[in-house]
């Protein structure tokens, strides 16, 4: 992913969106030391310890008949590439709700969760370590309206989707195809 994409979302070079420089509680400069066998940031003023966790995200592998729904990404990473609709789980929301909300926001359609497809961990420049929960989703809605983080949306055959999709999500197509058999 290019530098331009990075800069457009976050201005601090070499710092991901889940890093801290100052204590989020009291605003003092954080320091580092070994705590529970791992180097962690802590606040020398108030005692805050930053236990850094992966950010949970969801991804919808949405099928309508024998076609897959892809969106063209409007935000980093992979701006301008075709991918399955994805997003972060909001606080207080469960993973399935998040998946269907992202689908609605990015394509205007509603769907139903069919099954859990897979769970993966990925390191990204923008967000650090993220956990991706992939769901198989069904819909019979035809009219797509790209919105939110998507600049376009469309239905594609499995073959077309394989050629278009970002490499990281190819495995999702294989997993979804296995469900069809
Ligand atoms: Zn503090």
Image: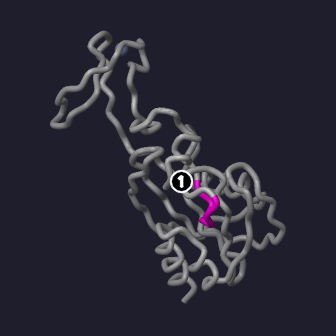
Q: Which residue reaches farthest top?
A: 45
Q: Name the residue under label 1.
A: 77
Q: Nearer the viewer, residue 145 or 100?
A: 145
The residues colored magenta run: 80-86
Q: Along the horizontal axis of the image, is 118 left or right of 70?
A: left
Tell me: is circle 1 under 8 Å from ligand 1.
Answer: no
In the displayed structure, 68 sits above or below 91; it is below
Residue 23 percent coordinates (x, y): 38, 19
Q: Quadrant of residue 15?
A: top left
Q: How many marks?
A: 1
In the displayed structure, 95 sits above or below 41; it is below
Q: Along the horizontal axis of the image, is 128 left or right of 33?
A: right
Residue 38 percent coordinates (x, y): 19, 37
Q: Which residue reaches farthest bottom?
A: 181
Label 1: few (<14), some (14–19) or many (≥20) C-alpha neighbours in 10 Å:
some
Q: Residue at x 72, y 70 (%)?
A: 139
- The image quadrant where one finds ligand 1 is top left
Q: Along the horizontal axis of the image, is 1 left or right of 68?
A: left
Q: Is residue 140 magenta?
A: no
Assign the C terminus to one quadrant of the image. bottom right
Q: Which residue is drawn at 49% across and 55% down?
A: 1
Q: Which residue is drawn at 30% across and 17% down?
A: 43
Q: Does the magenta stretch include residue 84?
A: yes
Q: Which of 169 and 89 is in front in this view?
A: 169
Q: Residue at x 19, y 26 (%)?
A: 33
Q: Quadrant of residue 37?
A: top left
In the displayed structure, 158 sits above or below 37; it is below
Residue 60 percent coordinates (x, y): 60, 63
């Amino acid at each position: 992913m290019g530098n331009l994409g990075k800069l457009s979302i976050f201005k601090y070079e070499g710092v991901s969106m889940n890093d801290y420089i100052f204590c989020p509680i009291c605003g003092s400069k954080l320091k580092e030391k070994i705590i529970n066998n791992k180097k962690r940031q802590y606040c020398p003023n108030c005692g805050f310890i930053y236990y850094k966790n992966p950010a949970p995200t969801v991804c919808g592998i949405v099928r309508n008949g024998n076609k897959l729904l892809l969106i063209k990404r409007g935000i980093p990473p992979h701006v301008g590439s075709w991918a399955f609709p994805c997003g972060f789980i909001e606080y207080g929301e469960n993973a399935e709700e998040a998946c269907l909300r992202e689908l609605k926001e990015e394509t205007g359609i509603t769907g139903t969760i069919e099954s859990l497809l897979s769970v993966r961990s990925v390191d990204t420049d923008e967000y650090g370590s993220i956990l991706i929960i992939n769901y198989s989703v069904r819909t019979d809605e035809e009219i797509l309206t790209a919105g939110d983080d998507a600049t376009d949306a469309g239905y594609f055959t499995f073959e077309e989707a394989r050629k278009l999709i970002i490499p990281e999500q190819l495995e999702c197509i294989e997993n979804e195809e296995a469900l069809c058999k």
